[in-house]
Image (cartoon, rainbow, N blue to C red):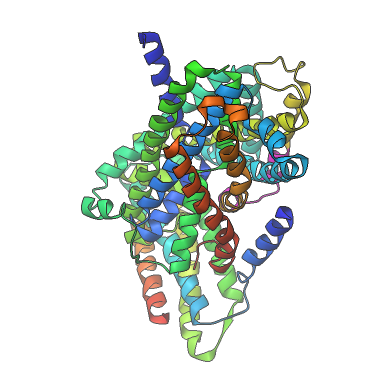
Amino acid sequence: MLVLGVAVALVVAGCGSGGGKLGAKALAEQSKALQALAAEGALLAQDAGAGKTTRIFTRVHSADLHKAAAQAAASLKAAKTEPALMPKLRRLQGLAVRIRGDLERLGGAAKNQAPALGRDLQAAAQASKQIGASLE
Amino acid sequence: MSLKNVLGVALGILSAIGGFVDIGDLVFNTQAGAVFGYQLLWVVVIGVVGIIVYSEMCGRVSAVSKRPVFDLVRERTGFGAGLATLIASSVVNLMTCAAEVGGVAICLQLLSGLPYRALIALAVVGLVVASWVLPFTWIERVFGYLGLCLLVFGVAAIKSHPGWGHVAHGFVPGSHAGGSLMVYGYFVVGLLGAAMTPYEVYFYSSGAVEDRWGLEQLKLNKVTAIIGYSLGGILSFALMIVAGALFLPAGIDPQFLGTPALAAEHVLGQVGLLLALVGILFAVGGAAIETSFSGAYNVSQFFGWRWGKKERPAAASRFTLSWLIIFALALLVVMSGYDPVKLTEYSVIFSVVTLPLTYLPILLIANDRTYMGSKVNGKLANVLGVVYFAIIIAIAVAAIPLMVLTHGGKG
C-alpha cells in the first residue's frame, strides 16, 4: 500500500514540469526559478571575488547551478505560450541563456573576474524578478 | 554522580547534539527559512519536544524490559500489524539511507572536486568500513563529535544579524506571509517529519539494549533525551535563521546541499565553509549508518535473529548481512542518478506517513505494566504522548496530499 502510494505520488509530483504551453502562472514560476539560480550564483561569485570561498567549492557548486540553469533554458526554449505572453517568454529565454553562460564561466573564473560575473548574475536575477512580478 | 559519570553524560549529550541533524533537517529547515523566514521556528520546537517525548519512552522501555522496541512491537501488535510496520519502516529507511549516502558523496565532492559517481562508491565503502571496524560507542561519538562542526551555523546565524524581534516572533504560531497556506502546511509537515524520523527512535532503543541499559540508566536516558535533543534543536533553529536572513531577501531557493554551506561561507569565509562541509559530511554520514543499522535492527528483531553491533559479525550474520544489503541498495538508488535532495524530500514526507505505525506501539508498550512494571508512563508523559500522537495522525493524513498539491513545496 505504502509502496503504491510512493509510486503514485512520485508520478503525480513529477507531472507538470515539462515544456508544453505555459500560462502566466507557469511563466511566473519559471522566472522565480531563474531568479533563484541567478541570485545564488551572484552570491557565490561575490564570495569568490572576496576570497571567501575555495576554488573547488566554486567550481562544483557553480556546476550544479549551471546544470539547473541549462535545464531551465532548455525547458523555456521548447515552451510555447499564448501570443500576449510571447514577449515575456522571449525575455525569459534570453535571461536563461545569459544565466547559464555566466554560471558556466563562474566555474573557471579567476578571482578578479568573479565580481563582474556576480554583478551580471545579480542584474539577471533582478530582471527575472521583475518579469515574474509582472506576470502575477 | 561521580566525575566519570558526569563526563559520560556530557559526552553522550555532545554526540546527541552532533547527531541530531541529518539531511532531512538540513533540507527542510533551510528551505523553510528561504520561503517563510523565521515564521516556522515554532514547528521546530514542537518537533524537538515530540522526539524527546518518544525517545525517552523508547529508552525507558528498552532499559526496563531489556528488549528493543521492534521486538516488543511484534509481540504487542501481532504478526500482521508488525509486518506492516516493518515493511513501511524498511522502505522509508532505505530511502533515507540513500539520501544520506548521496549527501555524503556531495559533501566529498564539494571538498575534493572529484567526480560524484566515484565518490558515491567511495562514500559507501567508507561507511561500511566505519560500521564494520568501529565499536558501537565510537560510531556514535566520532560522527556525533565531528557533526558538532555544524555549530558553525549557530555562529553564522548570529553574525548574519537577523532581526531578533522577528526571530522571537517566529516561535509563536500565527499568521504567515511569503507563501500560500498549503505551502506553509507542507513545510509544517516536513519540519515535524524531519525532527521525528522513525529511524532515530529505533536506533536509540536498540542502542540502549546494545549498551546494556538497566534501571540505573533511566536518569541518563531522560537527561540525554531532553538536553541532547533540545541543544540539537538549536542547530535546526540556526539553519532556518541563516536561510531567513540571507536566502529569503535574495530570493534563493536552496535546492542543493551546497547551499547551506554557501550561507556559512558568506558570513564566515573559508573557515566557515570548511566547518559547514565537514559538519554536514559527518552528520549525514552518521545518519547513513544509523539508518542502515536501524533497518537491520528492525528486520532482525522482527524475525528473532541474533542481532547487535557488539556481536561478532559471524555470530550475528543475518543482522550483518541486512545492514550491508541496505547500504548496497542505497548505493544502487543513488547511482541511478536520483537527486539526493529530492529523495530527502520524499523520504521525509513518506516517513511522516509511517509515523503512527512507529509511535502508537511505543505509546502502548510504555503504558503496559506487563512490560514496564512501575515504570509505566507518568501523567505528563501520557498527556504529551497522546497529544503528539494526535499531531502525528493529522500530519500523516495531510503529508502526501500536501506534497502533491504544492508540487513538493513549490506552490
Seen in the image, is A50 located left or right of residue B120?
A: left
Q: Position of residue B363 (x, y in %)?
A: 56, 40
Q: Nearer the viewer, residue B299 or B285?
A: B299
The residue nearer to you, when weighing B356 against A44, is: B356
Task: Name the residue at 58% across, 74% down.
Answer: A77
User: Looking at the picture, does residue A125 appear above or below residue B234?
Assistant: below
Q: Please say whether residue B334 is one of the residues in the magenta stretch.
A: yes
Is B407 inside the magenta-drawn segment? no
Residue sitting at x 53%, y 90%: A83
The stretch of residues the image draws in magenta is B329-344
B313 w.r.t. B46: above or below? above
Residue A122 makes an appearance in the image: yes
Instruction: Say which quadrant the N terminus of chain B sits in.
Output: top left
> Picture quarter containing residue B333?
top right
Rendering coords of residue B121 (x, y %): 67, 35
Q: Nearer the viewer, residue B49 or A20?
A: B49
Q: Give the quadrant of residue A35.
A: bottom left
The percent position of residue B376, horizontal first and vertical second, equals 52, 31
Secondary structure mostly seen in magenta is helix
Q: Nearer the viewer, residue B252 or B99?
A: B99
Residue at image location 78% in from the left, 25% down from the top: B318
Total marks shown come to 0
| Residue B93 shown left or right of residue A101 in the figure | right
Q: Residue at x 34, y 48 (%)?
A: B242
